[in-house]
Image (cartoon, grey):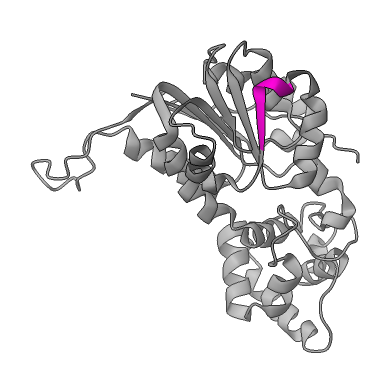
Amino acid sequence: MEFNHISVLKEESISGLNIRPDGIYVDCTTGGGGHSLEIAKRLTNGRLICIDKDTDALTKAKEVLKDYLDKITFVNDNFANLTNILAELKIDKVDGILADLGVSSYQIDTAERGFSFMKNARLDMRMNKNQTLDAYKVINEYSEQDLARIMFEYGEERNARQIARKIVKIREKKPIETTFEFRDIIVSSYPPKFQNKPSLCNKAFQAIRIEVNGELDDLKTAVESMINALRSGGRLCIISFHPLEDRIVKNAFKMHSTNCICPPKIPKCVCGHVADVKLITKHPIVPTDNELLSNTRSASSKLRIIEKI
């Protein structure tokens, strides 16, 4: 299994965690183990919990982290279940949490995973290969209205209605089975002058992937769990790649770092809300020019960091 992946904003996120050698840390999206390796290197008698819902990712991570296995616990689960994961491990609070929300290069580049419009395969896109919902079911079973909504909201796809209409028309004759079939539907929904644009299919594919994996719903649940799991002084670093992801993170961080969340027109606070975190990054950290040159997939990444009060 070839698992090539370049960790995004690695130095910035590891620095942001402010790692203590004896602390307890969680990598919620272990992937190929790049971030986890840097955390493990800095631990003496500390502990690292590596979570990923992709079994292939954990298999590779165990190879990458082979010199530090005595410090690491691997968990095959969704990070939205963080509260239960820590409870089962009898861990009350942790000193730092990292979440890299990007799809790994391995998942994109492995044809049979069905993530990429550049490689022909059965429509799949599941990060957790044990779940039943996949891209094939979304494309072939969702209503025209739901398909259009998903592509517009999750992918900001301007031709969402045309693509959805064409999907429904074609699947009346036969199921849409492969990534290339879906790609051709997207391309044919655009005027000829746009059809050779390399990134034409990005938004629709991204939208279906988000729906298949419930990424935005999971994130809303997970951010609250992550904040609650931190001990005083603990850091949370989240790397997002999608505007909707970043908005969820930004809004959660803002709410938790604000003492009063009453509507502006109310003259006196009645909510009683007290901030339980402070913002370490008032504005997101983005990749340097050097990182962009070495890893073009980092282009849309944003890192936000908070510290528990």
Q: Using the rendered view, name the quadrant where residue 66 is placed.
A: top right
Residue 192: x %, y % from top left: 82, 67
Q: Which residues are magenta?
A: 69-74
Residue at 47%, 24% (x, y): give it: 235
Labels in figure, total: 0
Tell me which residue sits at (59%, 64%) in the image: 152
Q: What is the residue that sits farthest to the left in this orientation?
A: 268
Residue drawn at point x = 73 percent, y = 27 percent? 34
Q: Nearer the viewer, residue 98 or 279?
A: 98
Q: Is residue 226 left or right of residue 276?
A: right
In the rendered view of the protein, which quadrant contains the C terminus?
top left
Instruction: Using the rendered view, name the quadrant where residue 301 is placed.
Output: top right
Image position of 280 (left or right of 35): left
Q: Is residue 286 above or below residue 226?
A: above
| Closer to us: 50 or 253 | 50
Q: Quadrant of residue 256?
A: top left
Instruction: Examine the rendered structure and indicate whether residue 46 appears above or below residue 139.
Output: above
Residue at 65 percent of width and 31 percent of height: 73
The answer to if 72 sits in the magenta stretch is: yes
Instruction: Give residue 248's position: percent from left, percent from top.
Output: 46, 46
Can residue 142 be seen by looking at this rendering? yes
Task: Say if 201 sits above or below 280 in the image.
Answer: below
> x and y percent of residue 284 in the render?
51, 30
